[in-house]
Image (cartoon, rainbow, N blue to C red):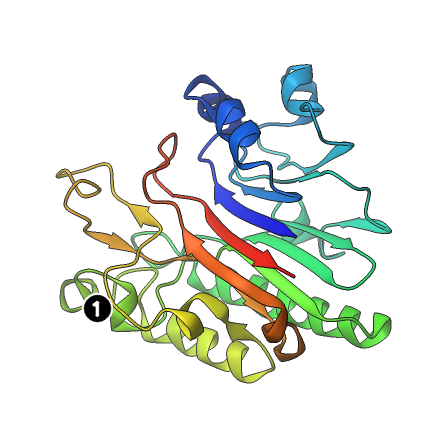
Amino acid sequence: MKLITWNVNGIRAAARKGFLDWLIQEAPDVLCLQETKACPSQLDQDLLKPVGYTATHWASAEKKGYSGVAFFVKESPLQVITGLGIPEFDCEGRTLTAEFADFILLTGYFPNGKDDLSRIPYKLRYSEAAKNFALTLKQQKQKPMIICGDINTAHQPIDIARPKENEGNTGFTPAERAWLTQFLQSGFVDIFREREPSPHHYTWWSYRANARANNVGWRIDYFFVTPELCPRVQRVYHQPHVMGSDHCPVVLELT
């Protein structure tokens, strides 16, 4: 089974840059998108129901052209849950959860703390709510859990090209990184880092200063799995060659 997560930085913009050709080529069983910046009424049929997919599911922000997440699925989940049941987060279209036969999948677009750090408290509240929602659902359903998406935090110095220069900047503050440490301690594995200990693997690059060409990036897009799923993980890897967004896709292949 092939799962992909990708912050597309606008699904309509990505579509103009070859998104559907990439989708046909990769053909994931489940595609998780973040920062779609659209609601279904704004999208063409080829995005609402792409060839080979039984359905797409969307959580959109109340504010037009902002945030938003989506699932593209080849086989219908047992259920799809939109949001966390908390209005201050759900109005921004940040969360979708799908229950499948043998695991639960949550995709999230975690908030950006903003350059002035003013949104870090909101980000941390959302992050904790998403974690608690996932752990509660896991306990209720007695199934392994996968959380994926744009977490908007580089966890360790290895996950960012210039850690010293970014100390104290949003996405690399002590508070954000400490939350991610605590999240992993609550029962999740950062499966890419578990399998790939080497540096220089990033998922987001600024559009400024030729950052992508020089691989001056941040690893802020993740797959987290609960430990019982680790033996099923065949591969987990990035696709930095795939353009169309300032983020690249992350792929998880399960047996």
Q: Quadrant of residue 240?
A: top left
Instruction: Tell me the quadrant of the picture where the C terminus can be found.
Output: bottom right
Left or right of 82: which side holds 210?
left
- Residue 116 in the image, given as x and y percentages of width and height: 30, 55
Q: Does 197 sit left or right of 180 as displayed?
A: left
- Crowding near the residue tagged with mark 1, few <14, some 14–19, many ≥20 C-alpha atoms within 10 Å: few
Q: Is residue 33 above or below residue 51?
A: below
- In front of the other: 170 or 241: 241
Can residue 190 be seen? yes
Residue displayed at 66% across by 45% down? 30
Residue 94 image point, x, y percent:
60, 48
- State the residue lying farthest toward the bottom: 185
Q: Residue at x 55, y 31 (%)?
A: 23
Query: Which residue: 19% across, 49% down?
Result: 215
The one nearer the camera, 185 or 249, is 249
Q: Is 33 or 227 nearer to us in this picture?
A: 227
The picture quadrant where one finds residue 91 is top right
Tell me the residue that label 1 is attached to: 167
Q: Is residue 216 above or below residue 34?
A: below
Q: Amino acid at mark 1?
A: Glu
Task: Decide: is 14 above or below 194.
Answer: above
Q: Determine if residue 222 is in view.
A: no
SS of the residue at dot 1?
loop
Count of number-bearing discs: 1
Q: Is 3 left or right of 83, judged from the image as shown?
A: left
**Relative image position of residue 252 (x, y in whole percent):** 54, 56
**Residue 248 at what x, y percent from top left?**
39, 43
